[in-house]
């Protein structure tokens, strides 16, 4: 229980404690605030620990300063040091953006992030570098399209995304009808775009694994996009091919013919045994063949890696990072493993998730990036993750993905099509706040097929407001 002389939404503090200081989750907290000269003073007592904390009063610009201060003072009281301090949100750049809009300089923001939020110097520099890249690209007068293909060759045991094995009963029964429904949805979307004068700046076909589509169906889908979606304002078109075991030369050629300019080819790790245990096929020769074909066709290539896969040793991770140097790619996305309830692995928590020597791995990442001339350009953190828990997209300058930036910043409205796709209508309320309304397409193909039209009516209502 929390007792205080200010109003506190207990749930937000509870969530913070659950993630960052779980050992005090059942303790009573007493928090009394005073304003003294230019400072806020907090007298804090938890169990038999107590202390007094001070911080400059910034409430004129940071309305919820006392709540933030209470959270990070709890960290200090229990001597918890995290690289991201008290920032547990998925989008830490939003905090930076808010402070900028309030009128603070980058220098003052660094001071606030360090002193109030307890963020490490390294993460502050990362946040500022990423945000400075993003502001040159963000454009809230355009929109994007996301198309979710919820099928994969096999389901990787760490994954919680919308995905069904193509050879499973769901895949066998609903794949064909899914494609037909998606074709209808593309046509409807074309009308929606025309009716609302939308300016589509980026298209992203993701999933799942979109390259699981047959060559014939891929062509039908890309053709439908070509016919129905106005591409006058289009700046990038991504086809997240992903898995080498689903890609053929012809699929890449079709993608190229219809204007795709970005593709992904994701090793996750180059250690075969690890991938096998995660139910993910991997053939290095075929991977190289796909890579060479992608290069030949002139695509901008992204590769995804995951750090912290179960039982993967530091040596093996360093090997993966060394191997990635062999590929001349424009984008690299490095994820930290996050185990969510929808993944098979979450249900098997007894497995050993490797303890890594973080410094060595981070040094190796820096070496790879330096060699490739890549810089961070978007980042997001995983919920429920106290420690490492961040995903960072790196790119060679000029090759940043607009879609990824817009998606993470929630700056631009998105029309989502296909399985599990989220449509977001974003309206600026004022300088600091956005109003975000979502329509979520069902993940399960059967429900998507049944409900697509109904959901589409919601999208029409949303965009005609
Ligand atoms: C939606 S998945 C699609 C990519 C494609 N199907 C593939 O597997 O190559 C996008 C990326 O999320 C990452 N990912 C998936 N599950 C994850 C997890 N549990 N923790 C961290 N990253 C994860 C992987 O790097 C993956 O490439
Ligand atoms: S990681 Fe990719 S291939 Fe594996 S299950 Fe998830 S979406 Fe499918």
Image (tube, rainbow, N blue to C red):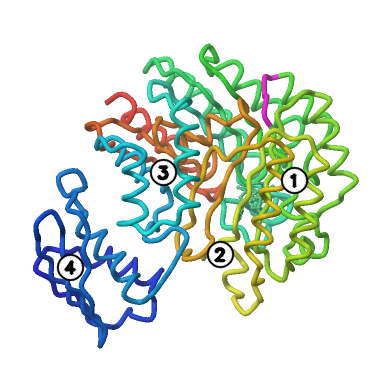
Region rendered in magenta: 258-262
> Whole-percent x and y of residue 197?
39, 15
Q: Is residue 249 left or right of residue 208?
A: right
Image mark for residue 93: 3
| Residue linked to disc 2 | 339
Residue drawn at x 68%, y 59% as measured from the top left: 361
- Judged from the image, the secondary structure of the residue bearing numbered disc 1 is loop
Query: Within 10 Å of the Cα at label 4, are there few (<14), some (14-19), or many (20+) other Cα atoms?
Result: many
Q: Is residue 226 above or below residue 278?
A: above
| Residue linked to disc 4 | 42
Please identify the residue farthest to the right as the structure is shown.
Answer: 285
> Whole-percent x and y of residue 141?
38, 21
| Front disc: 1 or 2 | 2
| Residue linked to disc 1 | 243
Query: Within 10 Å of the Cα at label 1, are there few (<14), some (14-19), or many (20+) other Cα atoms?
Result: many
Residue at mark 3 to residue at mark 2: CA–CA distance: 23 Å
Query: Within 10 Å of the Cα at label 3, are there few (<14), some (14-19), or many (20+) other Cα atoms?
Result: many
Please identify the residue farthest to the bottom as the structure is shown.
Answer: 48
Residue at mark 2 to residue at mark 4: CA–CA distance: 36 Å
Q: Is mark 1 within 8 Å of ligand 1?
A: yes
Magenta highlight: main SS: loop
> Whole-percent x and y of residue 307?
66, 58
260 within the magenta span: yes
Assign the N terminus to one quadrant of the image.
bottom left
Given residues 266 and 369, the one toward you in this image is: 369
Image mark for residue 457: none
* Label whose residue precedes the other's in the sequence (3 or 4): 4
Q: Is mark 2 within 8 Å of ligand 1?
A: yes
């Amino acid at each position: 229980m929390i007792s205080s002389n200010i109003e506190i939404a207990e749930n937000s503090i509870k969530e913070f404690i659950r993630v960052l200081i779980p050992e005090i989750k059942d303790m009573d907290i007493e928090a009394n605030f005073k304003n003294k000269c230019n400072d806020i003073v907090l007298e804090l007592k938890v169990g038999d620990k107590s202390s007094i904390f001070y911080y400059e009063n910034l409430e004129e610009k940071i309305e919820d300063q006392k709540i933030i201060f209470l959270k990070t003072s709890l960290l200090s009281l229990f001597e918890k040091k995290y690289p991201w301090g008290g920032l547990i949100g998925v989008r830490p750049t939003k905090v930076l953006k808010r402070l900028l809009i309030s009128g603070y300089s980058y220098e003052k923001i660094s001071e606030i992030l360090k002193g109030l939020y307890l963020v490490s110097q390294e993460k502050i520099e990362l946040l500022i570098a990423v945000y400075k890249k993003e502001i040159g690209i963000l454009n809230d007068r355009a929109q994007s399209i996301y198309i979710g293909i919820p099928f994969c060759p096999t389901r990787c045991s760490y994954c919680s995304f919308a995905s069904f094995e193509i050879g499973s009963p769901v895949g066998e029964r609903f794949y064909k009808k899914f494609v037909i429904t998606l074709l209808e949805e593309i046509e409807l979307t074309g009308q929606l775009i025309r009716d609302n004068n939308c300016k589509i700046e980026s298209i992203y076909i993701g999933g799942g694994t979109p390259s699981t589509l047959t060559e014939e169906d891929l062509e039908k889908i890309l053709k439908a996009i070509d016919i129905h979606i106005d591409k006058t304002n289009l700046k990038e078109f991504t086809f997240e091919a992903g898995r080498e075991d689903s890609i053929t030369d012809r699929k890449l050629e079709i993608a190229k013919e219809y204007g795709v300019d970005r593709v992904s080819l994701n090793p996750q790790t180059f250690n075969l045994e690890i991938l096998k245990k995660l139910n993910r096929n991997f053939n290095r020769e075929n991977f190289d063949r796909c890579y060479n074909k992608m290069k030949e066709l002139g695509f901008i290539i992204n590769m995804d890696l995951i750090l912290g896969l179960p039982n993967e040793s530091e040596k093996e991770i360093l090997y993966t990072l060394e191997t990635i140097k062999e590929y001349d790619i424009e984008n690299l996305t490095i994820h930290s493993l996050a185990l969510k309830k929808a993944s098979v692995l979450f249900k098997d928590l007894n497995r050993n998730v490797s303890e890594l020597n973080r410094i060595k791995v981070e040094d190796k990442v820096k070496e790879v990036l330096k060699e490739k001339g890549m810089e961070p350009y978007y980042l997001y953190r995983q919920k429920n993750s106290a420690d490492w828990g961040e995903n960072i997209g790196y790119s060679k300058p000029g090759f940043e993905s607009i879609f990824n930036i817009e998606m993470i910043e929630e700056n631009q409205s998105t029309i989502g099509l296909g399985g599990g796709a989220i449509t977001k209508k974003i309206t600026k309320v004022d300088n600091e706040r956005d109003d975000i309304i979502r329509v979520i397409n069902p993940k399960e193909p059967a429900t998507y097929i049944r409900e697509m039209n109904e959901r589409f009516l919601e999208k029409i209502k949303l965009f005609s407001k």
